[in-house]
Amino acid sequence: MKAQTPNRIILGIILTILTYWLFAQAFLNIAPEVQETYSSTSSSIINLSVSLTSLITGIFMVAAGNIADKIGYKKITIIGIFLSIIGSIIIILPFHTSFLIIGRIVQGFSAAMIMPATISIFNHIFEGEERRKALSYWSLGAFGGTGLASLFAGTMATFVAWQWIFIVSIVLSLIGLFLLKNIQDVHDKNRGPINFDFAGLSIFVVMIGALSIFITQGEVLGWTSAVSFILIVIFVIGLIVFIALEKRKRAPFLELSLFSNKAFLGTVVTNFLLNTAIGSLALFNIYTQQALGMTAFSASLVTIPYILTMLVAIKAGEKSIAKFGPKRALVTAPVLLGLGLIMLSLTFLEGTVYIMSCLIGFGFFGIGIGLFATPALDTAVSTTPRDKVGVASAIFKMASTLGGAFGIAIIVSVYSALSNTFSVAAAGSAAFIVNVVLLAVAFIFALVVIPKVSMKDK
């Protein structure tokens, strides 16, 4: 495969993963504009559509990674690209809210297929230092896409129309298909037939769905209502049954045995908690537009330090693996990200002063995300048996997307609930601080669980 132009493969995969990290994630930044299009739709439904793609991606990514290991990484990637195109087409047809919801669900299935399959393609093409470089490009597309999403979405929504975000996504998806069309497919020939754990998937969907509904719709249902209580009970019972069932399965939906590896366990949990900070990105755009009267474009300009510092920090994170091992970066990242969110939480400051604080905060934000990206991804795939890389990378990215989905749901819900009682400035500050607490837990987990030396080349 190395003879088949690795640079072309890298570019094709970067364009492919941008369909989620740049375009699908752009919904974080355009919720007010989308609600204007669907004027009869409640804000709770719009907020649900924002987090829905991440939620669907997280739920089904492990299943997609497992299937990709058996039928081929290229094949699953191509299917994912076609689903991305279909989802984008559905979303730009604003006939009814149901189109919006369906389109976001299709985008979720697309990302669930693309992410573990593309990581596995890199893992099979490259080894050692070359693999780390390739994975840093993957991280650049993923986290770089998230960084650009705010600026890109704000520009499109302010000067053109938010639907153009997904028109551009369709064009780049077609280019990605062209670049990847000639690569050989790779899969594990010794894994036998696909024995899919439908019972495990069903329980997982129900318990995650119940928790998601509680978080996103709790304000409407009532946080202490009977319905909310039932949703929590469903989640707890579902979790207990799920763990008991998966431990007995020969071919489980979720490979719980992978979590016996402390390096993998620590990286996945830290990854989940770190990605809740995506909720603060969504909150920043909502708060600055509601409280400060900024446009989507002007709000996105404030996030530029995030983009710039992250691009530099991603390469620094890659280099730090060989020099210090991955743990130093994985422990430092939550601290830097937390400092950034503290700067965002200073909503009591006056307009210009607050914006300056946010510019500094987004600088820390970008360094933290960039420093974490490659060491975390490399640790997840390099400490895993080669025949389970698809599943392992799927679990790792599931942690990212579910972390983002729950981060959006939790942070925006806290802001929405508190703004009914307190000022929007106080509500915004409190919501940011909630995210800081989650990052503090991430720091403690990374410090205690991840071994000092956890990376080895395979």
Image (cartoon, grey):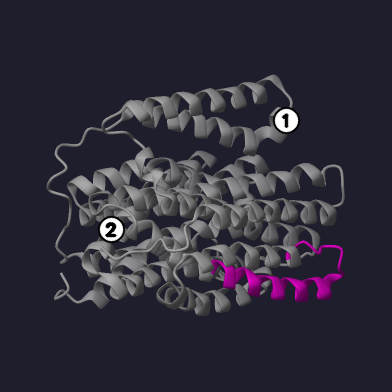
Residue, disc 1:
223
Residue found 63% across the figure and 32% down from its top: 214
| Dominant SS in magenta | helix
Residue 437, position in %: x, y? 70, 52
350 versus 250 height, above or below: below
Q: What's the residue at 54%, 74% (across, down)? A: 310
Q: Residue at x 50, y 30 (%)?
A: 207
The x and y percentages for residue 183 are 17, 65
Please state if 148 lies on the left or on the right of 250 as rendered. Answer: right
The residue positioned farthest toward the front in the image shown: 452
SS at mark 1 in the image: loop
The N terminus: image quadrant: bottom left
Magenta segment: 344-369
**Relative vertical location of residue 254 with respect to residue 122 in this rendering, above or below:** above
Q: Residues within 10 Å of mark 1 (few under 14, many from 20)?
A: some
Q: Which residue is mark 2?
A: 120
Horizontal placement of 451 versus 64: left or right? right
Q: Is residue 415 above or below residue 14?
A: above
Q: Which quadrant does the C terminus fall into?
A: bottom left
* Amino acid, disc 1: Trp
